[in-house]
Each structure stands twice: as C-alpha cells, then as structure tokens.
Image: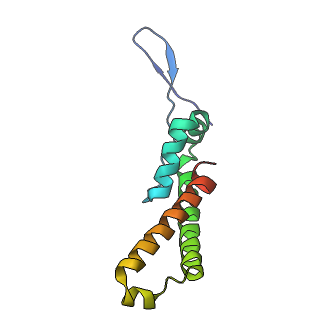
Amino acid sequence: MEITYRTTSEGYQIPNLTVPVDPEYDMGRFGLMRKQYLKNHRKILYVNLLTSGELYQHLCEIDQAANEQFELITKQMAKAEGVTEQLKSENQMLWVGRMNNIRNRAEEFIREDLIYS
C-alpha cells in the first residue's frame, strides 16, 4: 500500500487519507435504525466500521437479516393467532388491528435482537 502526501503552506507533509467508497445499496429501515444506534450509542464501533470501509456492508447484512426475520415472525404469529385471509374478508378492521399488533411485536423483537445488540 503506497501512501501519498501533500505539502501544506507551512511545509508540513500530510498523508492523503480517504475512506473507501461504499457500493450503492438501497438500505431499508432496519439498516438505518442500526446506523443510528451505532452512531449514538456505540461510537467506537461505528467509527471503526466506517474507517475500515465495512460499515455499509455491515448495515446491509443487518437490514437483510432483519427483513427476513420480520417476514418470518409476522407470518408465524399471524398463523398462531388465527389472523387469516378469511378474517380479512369478514372483518377488515379487526384484521388490520391484529396485523398492526403483530407487526409491532415483531419489530420490537427485531430491534432488541439485531439492531440494539
């Protein structure tokens, strides 16, 4: 690895350091939650991941895993609680209320298990 330097007006040699460019990824809400958590509560880990160029890869992995778990948990909870398409056609408001409750509980589980760990 070759390091290049630039000279300041005072004659000091300063290395030209840059952070690696991250590939474009359309990050979802769980990745953004994880980023915000790291930024506010785990600052050293955040800076280490950022400077090593691994931050967005880490956030993408968390986002994908969280989305997969969210879908799985939501389906399992809906099945266990009897929230079906038949209920949706018979009583939409009850179905919406129960699905919102299920989604909120699943998201809380994801936040505790993946985002804030």
Q: Which residue is rendered at x = 36% and y = 82% of the image?
A: 92
Coloration mode: rainbow
Q: Which residue is rendered at x = 57% and y = 30% of the image?
A: 3
Q: Is residue 9 above or below residue 107?
A: above
25 relative position to 2: left or right:
left
x and y percentages locating residue 89 in the rendered image: 37, 90
Q: Is residue 72 above or below residue 90?
A: above
x and y percentages locating residue 74 in the rendered image: 54, 73
94 relative position to 71: left or right:
left
Q: Is residue 64 above or below residue 74?
A: above
Total label count? 0
x and y percentages locating residue 60 in the rendered image: 53, 57
Which of these two is toward me, 21 or 71? Answer: 71
Q: Which residue is rendered at x = 58% and y = 74% of the image?
A: 72
Which of these two is toward me, 36 or 14? Answer: 36
User: Which quadrant of the figure contains the N terminus?
Assistant: top right
Determine the image quadrant of residue 108. bottom right
x and y percentages locating residue 84 in the rendered image: 48, 86
Q: Which residue is rendered at x = 56% and y = 79% of the image?
A: 81
101 relative position to 44: left or right:
left
Q: Residue furthest top?
A: 10
